[in-house]
Image: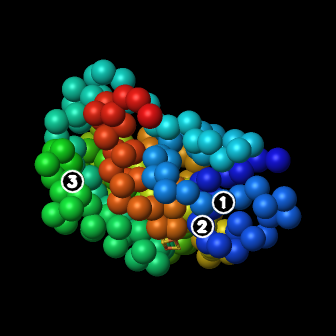
Amino acid sequence: MELDVGACLFAPEEASACPEGAIGFSAEYRMAAGERAGLQSPDGAVALARALEEKSRRLFGRSLRLRSVAAGSCNGCESELTALGNVVFDLARFGVQFVASPRHADGIVITGAVSRNMSSALYATWEAVPDPRLVIAVGACAINGGPFRGSPEVGDGVPGDLPVDLWVPGCPPHPFTLLDGLLRLLGRLESR
Ligand code: SF4
């Protein structure tokens, strides 16, 4: 049996549906992985994201600008991304900020299951970001479609030809999970 944290909606019904009672919830917030497969394991353990290679860290480590792309989301993930800017999390103190234009960005943050009517906008936004660029998938929807998985109106998450650098699970992810993943990617957090 395999537990896919990326597909998990973190709903009580998911735990109660397990006949062995093997699924439970904890206060662990460190769950962002660098690889999609890092979210899948027999016991729910996550292979946490590793730091970008040195050249990318030199480019992004002190100043990272991100453009958010809401590709068919419910606004839950955007609410938590917005919370990163409040006085509690204060993402800007780490040199990470959201910008309005992809041409001013170093990468995109994708939320939502990628609805059909947002697909071309997503690609256009990604192509407008200058190389080298990062792709960050936030939330169960972006990772595998979330509660909309299988609908003919969505693509079940970020398309396979977009190279995702960070997978942040949750429905929605906690701001600490987002912050932890970003800081790991930038090499600011090394150990668990
Ligand atoms: S992952 Fe959950 S909170 Fe985020 S957009 Fe999808 S349904 Fe909404």
Of circles 1 and 2, which is in front?
1
Which image quadrant for residue 20?
bottom right
Could you say which disc has been placed on residue 9 in the image? 2
Kindly indicate whether the residue at mark 3 contacts the one at mark 1 (C-beta within 8 angstroms).
Answer: no
The residue drawn where x is 16% and y is 41% is 63
Residue 62 % position (x, y): 16, 36
Q: Which mark is residue 24?
A: 1
Left/right placement of residue 3 relative to residue 36 reads right
Q: Nearer the viewer, residue 120 or 62?
A: 62
> Residue visible at 51% across and 61% down?
170
> Compared with residue 139, is residue 189 higher up or lower down, i.e. above or below?
above
- Write down the quadrant of residue 98 in the picture: bottom left
Q: Is residue 121 visible?
A: no
What residue appears at the point 18 percent right and 57 percent down from the top-left corner?
90
Circle number at residue 91: 3
Q: Work out whether residue 134 can be spotted.
A: yes
Q: Under tag 1, what secondary structure?
A: loop
**Label 1, residues with CA under 10 Å away: few <14, some 14-19, many ≥20:** few
Categorize mark 3 by other alpha carbons within 10 Å: few (<14), some (14-19), many (20+). many
Q: How many marks?
A: 3
